[in-house]
Image (spheres, rainbow, N blue to C red):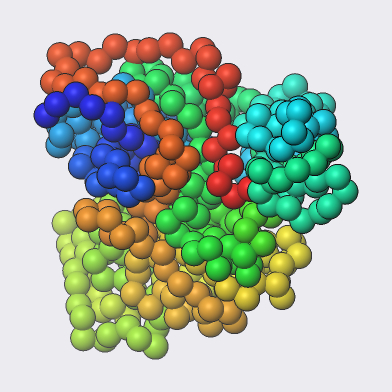
């Protein structure tokens, strides 16, 4: 394979770490390499063991590299968690050109001005996102480029995160021998492929039911309005199954993937399966109906918590487009019907339309690649047939962060 530019994304999740190599084709992408590994070293979406996380990242990257025969030198990394916060900000500058036409440079300057806000020392500014621009007092402008004006203002919010959490993510990736090309807010990245423009404008909740946590993000008028994290996810369903069937968590996870149904009313009493009992070699037979009586209550609880988070954000009656879900557990049969019943709103499961990754669990990692394509950014070139990987320094990573949410301006 000839040396050329590729886009690589990393999704560091609680249960799985995924690496995807994409080949840009115009404004689209061809998935040419997919690697995954168990998410050792993470709990509820947060890193609790650096060494285990590094090993998992290396394993996922090695799998992707072997599929294509190239060396991954840098990657875009998705980041999320309950440490992410939005803070309102305002910026104002004078239009610099002699003819008073607003340029990309003016927009860059006003966004940088909006960054000048005092934040606690334990927090890191990831990016600034425009909610609207104001040109000479005229509000409601989403893209002022090419307009004439003297004074350019922006109503924006800063996306900030815990300095410790961010640096731990970067440290793990760099210790695995990968340079961080950019950090990407996972819910915003996922929206690139999970949501339509109409859904973002009308009002929609994008919900990622991960293994250890569930993130809830609201988009309205095309802008991310708020995000929060519920410390409960698909692993809780697995844990309930392990207790209910008196089996190991490994067996419970396999049973969940192969036989689970989210609605008791739709579960079959004739679909039977056997699971090994804990502490012995004996196997016990259960039906899908038995399993559904365990799965449905926990999924109901997760959806009820999602509804409460939306109510806290103030959008309970303001989501005409309803809810769009993704995450591995959302591939469970009848789960969309259960969510719609619990939330009393339209529900859709997002599935990436890319060959080889058509599963709700790949939305975040594919969204990160879609972000890179839409913003025109590229990761560093790959090296063919590497002999060994050498760790690279990423000391200047934060100075390289781009306005990766600009397409929502």
Q: Is residue 381 above or below residue 314?
A: above
Q: Residue at x 32, y 49 (%)?
A: 28
The answer to whether residue 8 of the structure is visible from this angle is yes
Q: Quadrant of residue 292?
A: bottom left
The mark tally for this picture is 0
Q: Is residue 377 above or below residue 294?
A: above
Q: Is residue 273 left or right of residue 102?
A: left
Quadrant containing the N terminus in the rendered view: top left
Q: Is residue 235 left or right of residue 168?
A: left
Question: Which one is nearer the viewer's eye here, 372 or 274?
Answer: 372
Q: Position of residue 253 (x, y in %)?
A: 31, 57
Q: Residue at x 38, y 78 (%)?
A: 334
Q: Quadrant of residue 34?
A: top left
Question: Which one is nearer the viewer's eye here, 234 or 313?
Answer: 313
Q: Is residue 328 left or right of residue 170?
A: left
Q: Residue at x 71, y 67 (%)?
A: 315
Question: Which one is nearer the viewer's eye here, 151 or 132?
Answer: 151
Q: Position of residue 158 (x, y in %)?
A: 71, 38
The answer to whether residue 161 of the structure is visible from this angle is no
Q: Position of residue 259 (x, y in %)?
A: 26, 71
Q: Position of residue 232 (x, y in %)?
A: 53, 55
């Amino acid at each position: 394979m000839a040396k050329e530019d590729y886009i690589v994304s990393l999704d560091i999740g609680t249960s799985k770490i995924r690496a995807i190599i994409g080949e840009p084709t115009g404004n689209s992408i061809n998935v040419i390499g997919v690697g995954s590994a168990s998410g050792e070293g993470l709990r509820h979406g947060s890193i609790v063991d650096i060494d285990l996380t590094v090993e998992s990242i290396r394993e996922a990257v090695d799998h992707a590299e072997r599929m294509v025969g190239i060396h991954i030198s840098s990657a875009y990394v998705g980041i999320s968690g309950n440490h992410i916060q939005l803070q309102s900000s305002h910026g104002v500058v004078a239009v610099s050109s002699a003819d008073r036409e607003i340029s990309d440079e003016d927009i860059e300057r006003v966004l940088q001005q909006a960054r000048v806000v005092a934040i606690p020392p334990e927090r890191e500014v990831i990016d600034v996102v425009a909610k609207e621009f104001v040109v000479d007092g005229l509000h409601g402008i989403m893209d002022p480029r090419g307009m004439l004006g003297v004074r350019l203002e922006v109503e924006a919010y800063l996306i900030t995160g815990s300095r410790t959490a961010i640096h731990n993510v970067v440290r793990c990736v760099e210790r695995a021998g990968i340079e961080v090309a950019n950090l990407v807010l996972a819910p915003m990245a996922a929206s690139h492929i999970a949501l339509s423009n109409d859904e973002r404008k009308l009002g929609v909740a994008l919900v990622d039911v991960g293994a250890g946590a569930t993130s809830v993000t609201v988009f309205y008028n095309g802008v991310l309005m708020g995000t929060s994290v519920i410390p409960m996810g698909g692993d809780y369903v697995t844990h309930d199954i392990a207790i209910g069937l008196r089996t190991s968590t490994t067996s419970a996870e396999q049973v969940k993937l192969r036989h689970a149904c989210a609605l008791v009313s739709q579960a079959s009493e004739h679909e039977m399966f056997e699971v090994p009992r804990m502490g012995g070699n004996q196997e016990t037979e259960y039906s899908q109906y038995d399993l559904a009586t365990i799965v449905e209550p926990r999924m109901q609880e997760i959806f009820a918590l999602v509804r409460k988070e939306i109510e806290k954000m103030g959008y309970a009656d303001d989501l005409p487009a309803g809810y769009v879900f993704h995450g591995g557990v959302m591939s469970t049969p009848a789960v969309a019907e259960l969510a719609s019943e619990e939330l009393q709103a339209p529900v859709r499961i997002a599935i990436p339309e890319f060959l080889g990754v058509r599963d709700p669990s790949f939305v975040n990692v594919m969204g990160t690649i879609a972000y890179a394509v839409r913003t025109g950014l590229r990761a560093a070139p790959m090296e063919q047939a590497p002999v060994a990987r050498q760790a690279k320094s990423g000391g200047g990573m934060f100075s390289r962060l781009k306005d990766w949410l600009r397409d929502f301006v």
